[in-house]
Amino acid sequence: MTRSQTHAGIALGTIAMLAAVAVLAPPVPPASAEAQASRICREQGITASHTDYDYCLMKAERAIEWGEPEMARAFARVTAESRDACQSYGLDPSSSGYRSCFDRETKARSLLVFRDEKLKFGPQLAGPK
């Protein structure tokens, strides 16, 4: 056996061993709905340090669970835009005035975003049989 044949045999054996490991390795589980929602909120600049993070996380997580990632992104945008609008009015994020402003802004902006959305009646509305 020549030296090049030995090297080719080693390379082929290594590839076969790596392929066997890849086939036998457990699959990587998909990210949880909460992890995906958290990432989507962070992409819009909403982090856990913001007062509106819980709202964004709750809405985005629900949309992810329903299989609607675009809706989750829309909720994150609504949250960021509402936060920016209330802050532009000079309201302190820890005040009750800010909370009232945020509630009004998110409701209004959600209606505008989803007014053209087609209604989908899926398992999340039907419940268990």
Image (cartoon, rainbow, N blue to C red):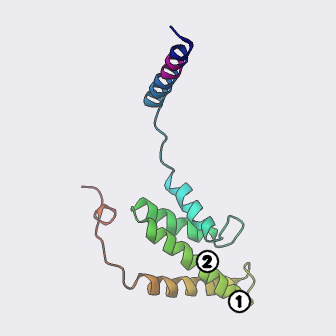
Label 2 CA crowd tier, 10 Å (few <14, some 14–19, many 20+) = some
Q: Amino acid at mark 2?
A: Ala
Residue 89: x and y, percent?
71, 92
Front position in the image: 107 or 60: 60
Residue 40: x and y, percent?
56, 65
Q: Furthest-top residue in view?
A: 1
Residue 103: x and y, percent?
57, 83
Front position in the image: 37 or 23: 23
Residue name at image x 63 percent, y 68 percent: 53
Is 10 one of the magenta-colored residues?
yes
Closer to the N terminus: mark 2 or mark 1? 2
Q: Secondary structure at mark 1?
A: helix
Residue 104 lies in what quarter of the image? bottom right
Image side of residue 115 versus residue 107, left or right: left
Residue name at image x 74 percent, y 78 percent: 94
Magenta-highlighted residues: 8-13
- Which quadrant of the figure contains the C terminus? bottom left
Residue name at image x 48 percent, y 43 percent: 29
What residue is shown with label 1? Answer: 88
Task: Reply above or below: 120 against 22.
Answer: below
Residue name at image x 45 percent, y 83 percent: 113
What residue is shown with label 2? Answer: 80
